[in-house]
Image (cartoon, rainbow, N blue to C red):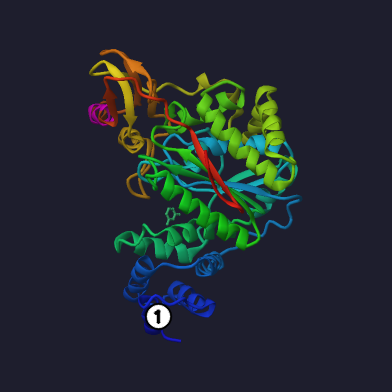
Amino acid sequence: MRMYDVITAKKHGMELTDEQIAFVVKGFTAGDIPDYQMSALLMAICLKGLNERETATLTMEMAQSGDMLDLSAIHGKKADKHSTGGVGDKTTMIVAPIVACLGVPVAKMSGRGLGHTGGTIDKLESIPGFRTTIPAEEFIRNVNEIQIAVAGQSANLAPADKKMYALRDVTATVDNISLIASSIMSKKLASGADVIVLDVKTGSGAFMKTVEDSAELARAMVSIGNHCGRKTYAVITDMNQVLGRYVGNWLEVREAMEVLSGRGDEELRMVSVTLASYMLYGSGAAKTLAEAETMVNRVLDDGSAFRKFREFVERQGGDVSVVDDPSRIPPVTYEVPVTAPRSGYVAEINAEEIGTASLLLGGGREKKEDTIDPLVGIRVDKKVGDRVNEGDVIGVLYGNDEKIIDAARERFLGAYRYSDTATKPVVPIYGFVDENGIHLN
Ligand code: URA
């Protein structure tokens, strides 16, 4: 088989065979297919597309290009969730303990943050002592004993995707739904869960800016998951503003603990309850979604979800005294209120800009090698639909370096757009996708 012929076939819009796709993924991962040929194929895919079978085969080949996590030693149906990336998205830290305390095992591989979006691993590491690198046996033992473990992704998880993504990034071939869906799902399939719930973000802070595109991406991922024998659901949620009130690693852990204790931001709770409910329903722990929601609300309100989070932190070496009393974490040096430059109604908050403001404060990474300050970040006080008067505090910057506060303030202020007439609050959930297709609210 020759790569030249595969590129030619796709250039003419022909379907690739499973053998051709396997040849490409294996050859590219091994270094036998050069970047220039792979780039040509990726561009042909962007122009001519992949059908569902081709997409599923590509995904499976990428998943099998590295370690396939063997979770067979874990009892019961394992549930996983994945977010396509947002600002202030701390739902994993809420959803995983909820589901675990209801008896469904969560064996989760998570990533670090890059650019304006955060990562669960960085957030958990803001708890002193918390270990995110744990040996496989300990990971499995923890899930069997307390139903929950969260660890950083192994370096050898879907290496074909890693290589392809790096190439797509510099050849303008990222924005193809089949390629994005197969990239995300290859890592999920390699992570071994039986039930996968995808939180597909839509809006200014997300990869997909419109509900229609997000629904299409969600549909493609659900189809891949189900095709590969995993029960897969997607919830399409808003990223036109920050989720919840806080951005920044430790600040988000605190906020997650508030929701786990039955308090906290209502929209954040709503999104978390929905994701957790799909995980319970998909794993068979609840017969209907309504039953699942009742179970989830109960464990949030009676303290069980919070206790499971505490147990999870303790198991992974974290200092539970800061879980019991978050004020034990020292405050940042600068807490700077930001005020509204005019009166009006908040019409838009560009979430990507808020994420970038937090990154500037030191809470994120521009490059993979950058170190982060776990304590800095942002509080968002005014959200879309709120009425403000000139001079009202719309948010607070938490920083440790005076020199960057002004730049972060400019970014934060620039994220807001105001209207003279009343604006509607943003809807947190737009719809869902299951094996029967897209259901928008
Ligand atoms: N995230 C991924 O993991 N892959 C993509 O292609 C896009 C976003």
Residue 360 position in % (x across, y down) = 30, 35
Q: Nearer the viewer, residue 422 or 245?
A: 422
Q: On screen, 314 above or below 186?
A: above
Span colored in magenta? 406-413
Which residue was labeled with disc 1? Answer: 9
Residue, x 37% and y 61% (percent of image)? Answer: 166
How dense is the environment of label 1, judged by Cα within 10 Å: few (below 14), some, or many (20 and up)?
some
Relative horizontal placement of residue 14, taking residue 72 as reference (left or right): left
- Spot occupied by residue 189 in the image (x, y as percentages of width and height): 58, 59
Q: Position of residue 226 (x, y in %)?
A: 62, 58
Residue beneath the point at 23% across and 17% down: 342
Q: Quadrant of ligand 1?
A: bottom left
Mark 1, secondary structure of its residue = helix
- 152, 297: nearer the viewer: 297
Queried whether the magenta region covers residue 408, the answer comes back as: yes
Main SS of residues in magenta: helix
